[in-house]
Amino acid sequence: MCGGTREPVSKVAAEGGAPQPVTKLKKGEFSHRWPSFLPDGRHFLYFAQAWAGQPSDRDKTYIGSLDSAEERPLLSSSGPAIYAPPGYIVFVRERMLLAQRFDAKKLRLIGEPFPIAERIESFPQTTTAIFSVSDNGVLAYQRGENTSDLHLAWIDRNGKEIEAVTPPGDYAHPRLSHDGKRVAYDVSDPQNGLADIWTFDLVRRVPTRLTFEPENEVHPIWSPDDQSIVYGSAQPNGAFDLYRKSSTGAGAPERIYTSAALKFPMDWSADGKTIVFQSNDPFQRNNWDIIALSVDKGTAANVIASRFNEDAPQLSPDGHWLAYLSDLSGSLNLYIEPFPPTGAKYQVSTGGGFQPRWRRDGKELFYRTSDDRLVSVTVNATSQGLQISTPTPLFQIRLAAAAGSGGFQYDISPDGQKFLMNVSKIEGVKPITLVTNWTAELKR
């Protein structure tokens, strides 16, 4: 059995064949995933994810059946749930690993959940949580970062931390203003997991909250004059729409583009005319596409849309080139195309590339490799096209994401000599905790 983004849970015969859906997405749901069988082999647990509403309302574990369309909500959770003998459901809720007694014959919970461990490593964008339970009573889990571990810091081109910029917090998607005096980011509330947009004055060291709506607001980008910020905001139908608000926080947010798709703004052209965003439309089987929004007209058009994933678009400072990621080669790599596209395409990375950022003069492009190095290439536009240098590794990075939020986790100073990065105090590989006979603690 398997599930995924914009997909129900499907079953596949042991000898192979075409997947057959065994669940159905309801209105507002984003995906069904993490199926795991219950002891009878006919019923199963699965996680239903929606993007709008409070976490307790939008994310639930259900019981499904191979023999009927029967489905029943079981509990509120933040990711996978697993049945563990002799009769428990083990699951994560807001980074807490919990267990609750379960009657496998009557398919019902007994009593109240009780905590097993705190600060479990979790990844909200994919609803992954690092834990597992064996049939013979062994529990394994990994602790994750939280607000005591993450901060934004300036890092020089040799990888040395110059200074911590912000106090500890669950920061994600930092974006520097064009004058380099402020940074915008989204930060998650540790209590409810919802993100809001904030700015931080790098001169006065003062944070300002921009959004207060009871939904997720993420991926801020600055207007060319730094007077406005555009961001994605969750909607009741499961989509994310684009909103604009004054960077001072004054006034109400203005919705500038709506559709049924997930939409996250990625960049704003220097002339102020175009916003590029990545979009995943549930009615198109194209995965992530790159879309351009006309700021004046409020209309959007495909820039790059195919059966592959294309995302993380970044416009060159002169607006003539578009760097982006695509998995057309089988894995995510970095490409550059003219903007608007002409059919020309330049592959920048070969062994994986992520999070591209241009230097402000457009002469250098940075990206993250699959082995967590920050790499630089020089870019020179000629009459024959682009000349792109061999990638030069700068340093091994320890970028961190707020509870696995993904996306961009760094930006570049206007002079290109230092990087504002989301980093963790924790270095190295986090250990896995093993607990034998884990249910013994529950009986005390």
Image: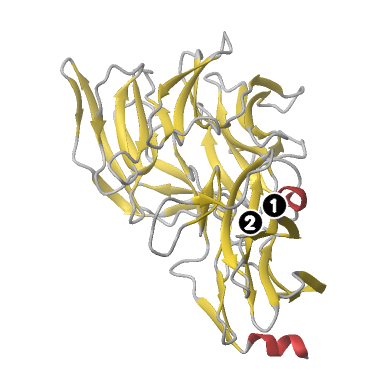
Whether pointer 2 and pointer 1 mark residues with C-beta atoms closer than 8 Å, the reply is yes
Q: Nearest the camera: 255 or 69?
A: 69
Which residue is painted at 74% across and 69% down in the image? 107
Determine which quarter of the picture holds residue 336.
top left
Q: Is residue 184 above or below residue 248?
A: below
What label does residue 407 carry, if any? none
Give how far across and how far down residue 163 sits, in percent: 50, 51
Badge 1 density bin: few <14, some 14–19, many ≥20, Cα 10 Å? many
Question: Image check: 279 left or right of 382?
Answer: right
Give how far across and how far down residue 327 sits, in percent: 34, 41
Q: Is residue 437 above or below residue 7?
A: below
Question: Image check: 399 left or right of 39?
Answer: left
Image quadrant occupied by the C terminus: bottom right
Which residue is painted at 66% across and 67% down in the image? 91
What label does residue 59 carry, if any? 1
Does the rendering let one see residue 168? no
Give how far across and how far down residue 137 sits, in percent: 60, 86
Residue at the extreme right: 111
Q: Nearest the camera: 401 or 101?
A: 101
Q: Is residue 375 above or below residue 317?
A: below
Q: Secondary structure at mark 2?
A: strand
Give how far across and how far down residue 14 sits, in percent: 42, 65
Q: Which residue is mark 2?
A: 47
Earlier-in-chain disc, 2 versus 1: 2
Q: Which circle, 2 or 1, is nearer the viewer?
A: 2
Indicate the amino acid at tag 2: Phe
Q: Secondary structure at mark 1?
A: loop
Determine which quarter of the picture holds residue 127.
bottom right
Q: Is residue 179 above or below residue 432?
A: above
Indicate the amino acid at tag 1: Asp
